[in-house]
Amino acid sequence: MTTATHYLPATRRWAWLANPTLRRFMRHKLAVLGVVMITVLILACVFGPYLLHYNDLSIDIRNRFAPPFTGNHYLGTDALGRDTAARLLNAGRISLMVGFCAMLISISIVIGTLIGVIAGYYRGWVGAGLMRFVDAFLSFPSVFLVLVLAAFTKPSPMMITLIIAVTSWMEISRIVEAEIRSLRERDFTLAARMIGASNRWIMFRELMPNAIGPIIVAATLTIANAILLEAYISFLGYGIQPPLPSWGNMLNAAQQYLGKAPWLAIIPGLAITLAVTSFNFIGDGLRDALDGRSDLK
C-alpha cells in the first residue's frame, strides 16, 4: 500500500509526457533546438550582465575597438570603449521584450483573428470585402507602415512595441480565414446549424476553438517578426534611441566601422539571426505538433 501511495503521485507528475501533442513537438528536432537556443539566449540576457566586469555604459577609452577576447572584454569594445558583451546582452533584453510584449499585448492577434473568423465564416461579399481590406494593408510592406508611425511618435520601447503590435495583424487574418473556411463545412459545424445554433455561437464556440492551433503558431511567429521589425527601424534611426541599446541601433552604430571593427556588426547580427531562427523553428514545431494528421505520416 505504501509503495502504491508513493508511486501514484510520481505517475501523475510525469503523465504530461504522454501528451500526444508534446510527443509530436519533441520529435521535431529543430523545434527542440529552437527552444534550447532561445532559453539560453533569454537566460544570458537576464543574468549575463551581472556576471560581466563592465556594464553597458562603462567607457574604457584606452581600449577602443578592442577585438573579442581582449582582457575582460569578452566580445571586444566599440568606438567609445564600451563593452560589446554588456551592450549585446542589455540590448537583447530590449529586443526580446519588444518581441514578447508585441505578442502578449495581443492587439494583432485579436484583430487578425476577429477579421479572419468573420471573413472565413460568412464568405460572400462580407468575406470578400474584409479580405480585400486586408490585402490593401498587405500591399504596403510592414516595415514602411511601422516607419511612418514611428516617425510621428516619440521613440521608446513601449511605443515601438505598440506600433509593431498594431501593424502585425494582416498575416494572422489570412491564416485564420483559410482555416475557418475549411472548418465551416465540417460535420460538427453542420450539426450546430441543424440544432439552431446562432452564427455567433458557431463562429466563436465551435470554429475558433478548432482553429486555435494556427493562431498559436501565428503568435509565436509574431515574436520573430517583431524582433526583426524593431531591428529594422532602430537600424534606420527611428526606433530605440542611444544610449539605450538594442540590436538594431548597435548595427546602426557599427556600419561606419565595418572595415576597422567588423565584429561590432557581426555580433548583434548573429544575435538577431539566432533569435529569429529559434522562434521560426519553434513555430514550425508547433504547427506539426498541433496537427494530429502528422501522426499518420
Image (cartoon, helix red, strand yellow):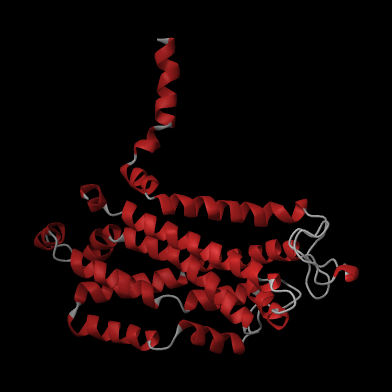
Tell me what residue is drawn at x 49 percent, y 66 percent.
Answer: 223
Q: Where is residue 11 in the image (x, y as percent from the top left)?
A: 40, 26
Q: Position of residue 203 (x, y in %)?
A: 25, 66
7 or 205: which is nearer to us? 7
166 or 219: which is nearer to us? 219
91 or 107: which is nearer to us? 91
Tell me what residue is drawn at x 71 percent, y 83 percent.
Answer: 256
Q: In this view, does 286 lie to the left or right of 231?
A: left
Q: Which residue lies furthest to the left in this view?
A: 194
Q: Residue furthest top?
A: 1
Q: In this view, does 103 lie to the left or right of 233?
A: left
Asked if residue 132 is positioned above or below residue 95 in the image, the reply reads below
Q: Position of residue 143 (x, y in %)?
A: 50, 83
Tell me what residue is drawn at x 76 percent, y 53 percent.
Answer: 50
Q: Quadrant of residue 66?
A: bottom right
Asked if residue 10 is positioned above or below residue 187 in the image, the reply reads above
Q: Quadrant of residue 10?
A: top left
Quadrant of the drawing holding the N terminus = top left
Q: Is residue 190 at least partly visible in the picture?
A: yes
Q: Is residue 152 at least partly visible in the picture?
A: no
Q: Is residue 28 left or right of residue 292?
A: right
